[in-house]
């Protein structure tokens, strides 16, 4: 059934949520107090260093199927494949262009969506208020995931609706440990299990 859709009023007033950047003057000055050797580095240079490091982190998350463990034991981040949600996923650009409601079916990815998952449940060291933490990817990260996922969607882990993310991370760590033990040659080459002497 074709449903007509009304184009949005692009000149209407908008509500914009105010955001607070963590890279502000107060944080950078407290960083310099803890590390006086970086007092000569300007705020812009510090921001650029932090953004470059974070860029390497999210690029590794995209390239590596199992994601990464964040520095300082803050948790794990990975990209997973999820089934299409039950509610309609409307493609607003195409709907506005054609004047009818167009639903995005994700046929290029066999009906799967990319989602960025974060968990700190399996962190090595439990930190205070860890249940209050959440992860929100920057725009560059989410857009790069979207572009990459269309071409490489089979390589990512499929996450079912009922599956706990902490169990996936635990399973991955157990498999990595097993592969590491197999890679080590703990049994000497001269060992013969049938030799009883």
Image (cartoon, grey):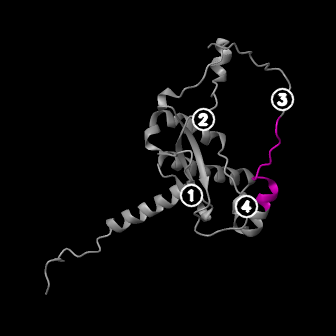
Which mark is first along the chain, 1 or 4? 4
Per the rendered image, the range of residues in magenta is 16-29
Which one is earlier in the sequence, the residue at label 3 or at label 4? 3
Q: Helix, strand or loop at disc 1?
A: helix
Toward which corner of the image does residue 188 lie, by quadrant?
A: bottom left
Q: Is residue 157 left or right of residue 71?
A: left
Distance between mark 3 and mark 1 Cα atoms: 38 Å
**What residue would you read off at disc 4?**
40
Please identify, in this view, whether the residue under mark 2 or under mark 3 is nearer the observer.
2
Numbered mark located on residue 166 in the image: 1
The CA span between labels 2 and 4 is: 51 Å
SS of the residue at dot 2? loop
CA gap between label 2 and label 3 equals 27 Å
Q: Residues within 10 Å of mark 1 (few under 14, many from 20)?
A: some
| Magenta segment, prevailing SS (helix, strand or loop) | loop
Label 3 neighbour load within 10 Å: few <14, some 14-19, many 20+: few
- Position of the N terminus, as image quadrant, is top right
Q: Secondary structure at mark 3?
A: loop
Tell me, for residue 85, which label it has, or none.
2
């Amino acid at each position: 059934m074709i449903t007509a859709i009304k184009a949005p009023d692009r000149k209407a007033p908008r509500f914009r949520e105010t955001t607070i950047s963590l890279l502000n003057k107060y944080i950078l000055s407290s960083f310099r107090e803890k590390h006086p050797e970086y007092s000569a580095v300007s705020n812009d240079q510090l921001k650029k260093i932090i953004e470059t490091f974070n860029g390497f982190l999210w690029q590794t998350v995209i390239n590596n199927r199992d994601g990464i463990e964040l520095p300082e034991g803050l948790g794990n981040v990975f990209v997973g494949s999820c089934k299409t949600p039950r509610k309609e996923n409307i493609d607003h650009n195409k709907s506005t262009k054609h004047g009818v409601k167009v639903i995005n079916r994700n046929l290029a990815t066999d009906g799967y969506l990319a989602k960025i998952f974060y968990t700190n449940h399996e962190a090595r060291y439990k930190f205070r208020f860890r249940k209050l933490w959440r992860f929100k990817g920057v725009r560059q990260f989410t857009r790069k995931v979207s572009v990459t996922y269309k071409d490489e969607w089979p390589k990512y882990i499929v996450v079912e609706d009922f599956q706990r993310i902490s169990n996936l991370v635990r399973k991955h760590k157990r498999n990595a440990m097993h592969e590491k033990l197999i890679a080590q040659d703990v049994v000497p080459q001269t060992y013969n299990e049938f030799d009883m002497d």
